[in-house]
């Protein structure tokens, strides 16, 4: 009887330990969701915490050049989550043949007169619809209403990703691990995106060591250290070999601006096609969504379901990815059809081939 009683008590304690462990993990997932939601700026508020406190704003590298043409000059900076800058008027984009935001001079001068008090939000941040930096498709980034794309947790990074897209890039050789990571990101897990590790050596950037500074592709999540930069991404044009220039030093502070080999350089522009920025169609924002086959509601699993899925993951198996958000879109379908985006810059980089 004592032996049976001891066994029973042992089984009960084991169940209690499992339940307590599950509760702690569930609380961790819930806390992660709250942290993600807290990063979203409120209406009329800058996403930059230093600027909101009256201090000098944090300046990410992408603010140094226009998001359309990748050239510098007089720019207007978005105060939303994307952290991008744009040439505001046609005059400002003449040198680089930039399409620009198309603001009239009166509106631009009015914004300039406000100084630091003047906040500008691009159409993506205003309507909380951002492009996945991997596949280029638009998705809702509204963390309070079924998000489809999630922002990298790094403070100076303005890139958004579908959970399935970033999972495939970070875990290309482990389908089971990619599936589990995708589910965790969809459940609110914060993540550091691929642009913070060198594609070749997988090490982080060190701005104090020139050879360890990054060369950053402006069209997709491809990044190299200076010392790891492939020879076919050259800082000079080779006319004999008909190799175009793909890298520029001195444009981004302490970094090299590059276009990797996935993107064809247009001779007349000196850059790839400038159809990579997609603003939402505010006249009928749901129309393009339905054409692309996106669900009307993001299917985020609850804590128990998420934990059960993670617990059942086996690296020796290859489960099918959960059909949440944009993960239904296969890599071959990742190029956004131009007729779906009437304003102003349709297209995508379609980067999921590595």
Image (spheres, rainbow, N blue to C red):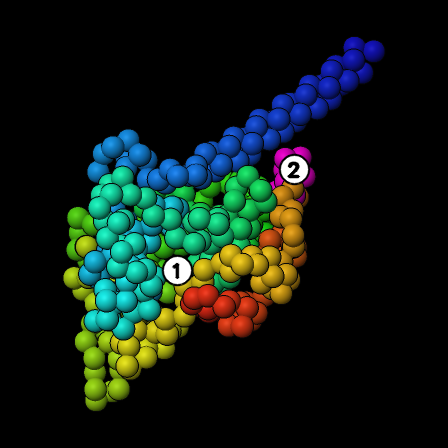
Q: Measuring 36% from the left and 77% from the top, which residue is drawn there?
A: 264
The circle drawn on residue 221 is 1
Image coords of residue 51 (percent x, y): 28, 37
Q: How many marks?
A: 2
Pointer 2: residues within 10 angstroms few (<14), some, or many (20+)? Answer: few
The circle drawn on residue 41 is none
Q: Measuring 55% from the left and 34% from the top, which residue is drawn there?
A: 29
Quarter of the image where one finds residue 258: bottom left
Question: Mark 2 falls on what kind of element?
Answer: loop
Q: Nearer the viewer, residue 346 or 16?
A: 346
Q: Measuring 36% from the left and 40% from the top, which residue is drawn there?
A: 47
Q: Is residue 270 left or right of residue 202?
A: left
Image coords of residue 14 (percent x, y): 68, 23
* Marks 1,2: beta carbons within 8 A: no
The residue singled out by tag 2 in the image is 302
Outermost residue to the top: 2
Image coords of residue 202 (percent x, y): 35, 55
Q: Is residue 104 left or right of residue 37?
A: left
Residue 180 vs 280, above or below: the answer is above
Outermost residue to the bottom: 240
- By secondary structure, the bulk of the magenta-drawn segment is best described as helix
Q: Using the rendered image of the protein, determine whether residue 113 is visible from the camera's viewpoint.
A: yes
Q: Nearer the viewer, residue 60 or 226?
A: 60
- Report the span colored magenta: 303-311
Image coords of residue 13 (percent x, y): 69, 19
Residue 167 vs 331, above or below: the answer is above
Residue 95 vs 268, above or below: the answer is above
Q: Tell which circle, 1 or 2, labels the residue nearer the N-terminal end.
A: 1
Q: Nearer the viewer, residue 92 or 242?
A: 92
């Amino acid at each position: 009887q004592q032996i049976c009683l001891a066994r029973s008590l042992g089984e009960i304690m084991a169940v209690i330990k499992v339940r307590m462990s599950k509760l702690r993990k569930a609380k961790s997932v819930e806390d992660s969701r709250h942290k993600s939601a807290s990063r979203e700026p409120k209406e009329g508020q800058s996403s930059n915490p230093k600027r909101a406190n009256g201090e000098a704003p944090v300046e990410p590298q992408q603010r140094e050049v226009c998001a359309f043409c990748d050239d510098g000059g007089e720019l207007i900076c978005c105060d939303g989550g994307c952290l991008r800058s744009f040439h505001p008027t046609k005059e400002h984009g003449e040198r680089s043949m930039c399409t620009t935001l198309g603001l009239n001079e009166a509106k631009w001068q009015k914004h300039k007169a406000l100084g630091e008090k003047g906040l500008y939000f691009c159409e993506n941040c205003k309507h909380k619809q951002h492009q996945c930096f991997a596949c280029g498709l638009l998705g809702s980034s509204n963390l309070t209403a079924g998000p489809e794309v999630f922002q990298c947790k790094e403070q100076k990074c303005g890139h958004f990703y579908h959970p399935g897209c970033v999972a495939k890039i970070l875990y290309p050789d482990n389908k089971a691990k990619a599936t589990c990571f995708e589910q965790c990101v969809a459940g609110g897990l914060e993540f550091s995106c691929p642009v913070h590790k060198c594609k070749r050596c997988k090490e982080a950037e060190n701005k104090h060591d020139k050879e360890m500074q990054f060369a950053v592709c402006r069209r997709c999540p491809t990044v190299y250290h200076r010392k790891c930069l492939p020879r076919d991404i050259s800082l000079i044009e080779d006319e004999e070999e008909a190799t175009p220039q793909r890298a520029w030093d001195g444009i981004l502070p302490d970094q090299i601006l590059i276009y990797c080999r996935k993107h064809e350089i247009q001779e007349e522009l000196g850059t790839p096609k400038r159809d990579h920025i997609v603003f939402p169609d505010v006249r009928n924002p749901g129309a393009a969504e339905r054409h692309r086959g996106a669900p009307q509601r993001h299917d985020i699993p609850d804590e128990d379901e998420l934990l059960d899925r993670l617990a059942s993951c086996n690296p020796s198996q290859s489960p099918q990815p959960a059909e949440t958000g944009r993960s239904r879109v296969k890599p071959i379908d990742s190029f956004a059809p131009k007729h779906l985006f009437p304003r102003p810059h349709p297209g995508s980089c379609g980067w999921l081939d590595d």
